Structures are given as structure tokens and as C-alpha cells.
Image: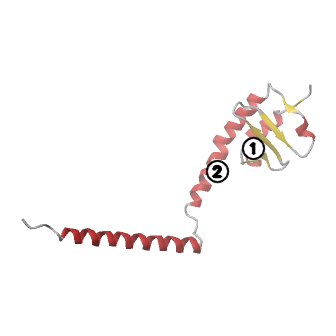
Amino acid sequence: MAYLDASPLISALRTNPEVFEFSNGHLRHIPSRHSFHFDRAGDVRVRADCACSFLKIAENQQPALFEAFQEWRTNYWRPIEINREFAAHFRARSWLRRQLIKMTASLLRALVADRRRASTAKAGLVPAE
């Protein structure tokens, strides 16, 4: 049986990590639009609009490809995800969200103030001895 040679993919993951992205559980090569799905065992499925998807990646290359993918994800993609998440914490909120936060804060202050008034009133009702 003929197999797909994954050595160019392995090399590209190591030398040009910026041409890949990870989305919805798939590694995607941006220029070719090929995507690769890795299962937990390290097996790889190729999705492509061309004949590349007709061949399976050689079994003896799958461990090296999975290792290269794990390295790419840990050393390149994960820091990008963390930085995007960090930047999102400081993004300006929409007008609607700001208004909802203000209304929630006002309601919370009113409830806390009401509870304080109720506890102060109870403190004034001390039975006589």
C-alpha cells in the first residue's frame, strides 16, 4: 500500500511554525488549507481538497509527526493562546455589558444595605432582664 510521506510536514512544523494554526481540534496548514486531526493514540487523519487525503500517513512516521505536533503546540501555539486570553482581559467591554454590570452592582449594593438595616434593627431589640 502507498503511504503519504509526512517528512515535509514534520520539517515545516519545526522550521515554519507560523504557517500553522490550531482550531477546533485540528492542526491546519494555512497556505495549503490541509488539516490534520490527531487522536489520543497519536494517529493522524488528513483532510484536504486535493488527492493528499487519499493516502494515509505511514505508520512509522506517525510517532515523529505526533511528537513534532506536541512540540509545536507546547512551544509555539500555547503561548499565543495564553497571550490572546491575557489581552482579552483588558479589552473594552460593550455598552450593553457595562450597563448590565452597573445594574448588577447597584442591585448588590441595595441588597447589602437592606441586610445591614435589618441586622441593625434586630440589634436594637434586646430583651430586658
Judging depth in this view, the residue of 37 and 16 nearest the camera is: 37
* Residue lying at 72% horizontally and 31% vertically, measured from the top left: 42
| Contact? badges 1 and 2 (CB < 8 Å) | no
Residue named by callout 1: 27
Residue 54 located left or right of residue 16:
right
Secondary structure category for the residue under label 2: helix
Q: How is the image coloured?
A: secondary structure
Q: Where does residue 82 sit, x and y in percent of width and height?
A: 59, 51
* Residue lying at 53% horizontally and 72% vertically, measured from the top left: 100
Q: Where does residue 76 sit, x and y in percent of width and height?
A: 66, 45
* Residue lying at 64% horizontally and 42% vertically, measured from the top left: 75
Q: Where does residue 13 sit, x and y in percent of width and height?
A: 75, 40
Circle number at residue 80: 2
Q: Where does residue 53 sit, x and y in percent of width and height?
A: 88, 39
Judging depth in this view, the residue of 17 and 34 nearest the camera is: 34
Specify few, some or many for label 2: CA neighbours under 10 Å numbering under 14, 14-19, or 20 or more. few
What is the quadrant of the C terminus in the image? bottom left
Quadrant of residue 111 within the rendered picture: bottom left
